[in-house]
Amino acid sequence: MAVASASVAAAVLFAPTASAIGHLGAAPVAPAGAVSSAVVPQSAWDTLSKIDAGQWPPNDGSGTRGGAVWANREGTLPRDDAAGNPIGYREWDVNPKRPGQGRDAERIVTGDDGSAWYTGDLFATFTRMR
């Protein structure tokens, strides 16, 4: 699936509600009222391109992290693809960590099914990037 251009693509927003928990399949269905024209920042699109190219996170000792397993414990994102295979997820910082500060709340979560999700609020809500 092609990455949408810039930052004003229509997107599906997922929040961890009861209607979002459980098996949703490969073509996720948003909970009622969750379809949004949410804006994904350009920095997230840039980071996703670097993730896809194997160039993120930078190996500069900054503390920027990426590639750790994200368990999807709350079932916020789809658990299985259309064939019933479990989807594994990994999390990535969107922005480089700044010296003397903690990591910020922006993350990208990628699925081994090819999906990518942006969260600007540390996993409270997600906007599908692809």
Image (cartoon, helix red, strand yellow):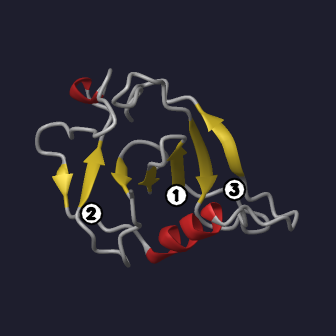
Q: Quickly name the residue at label 3.
A: 102
> Which of the marked residues, 1 or 2, is nearer the chain's N terminus?
2
Residue ID at (11%, 38%): 32
For residue 108, above or below residue 59? above
For residue 117, above or below residue 4? above
Image coordinates for residue 124, horizontal then vertical, percent: 40, 42
Q: Which mark is residue 38?
A: 2
Tell me which amino acid carries mark 3.
Gly
Image coordinates for residue 98, horizontal then vertical, percent: 73, 68
How crowded is the residue under tag 1: few (<14 C-alpha within 10 Å), some, or many (20+)?
some
Residue ID at (74%, 59%): 64
Q: Is residue 32 left or right of residue 77?
A: left
Which of label 3 and label 1 is nearer to you? 1
> Which of the marked residues, 2 or 3, is nearer the chain's N terminus?
2
For residue 6, above or below residue 83? below
How crowded is the residue under tag 2: few (<14 C-alpha within 10 Å), some, or many (20+)?
some
- How far separated are the C-alphas under marks 1 and 2? 14 Å
Residue ID at (30%, 43%): 14
- The furthest residue to the front: 83
Image coordinates for residue 65, horizontal then vertical, percent: 72, 53
Q: Are marks 1 and 2 in contact (CB under 8 Å)?
A: no
Q: Secondary structure at mark 3?
A: loop
Q: Quick one: quadrant of the C terminus?
A: bottom left
Q: Which mark is residue 106?
A: 1
Which of label 1 and label 2 is nearer to you? 2
- How far separated are the C-alphas under marks 2 and 3? 26 Å
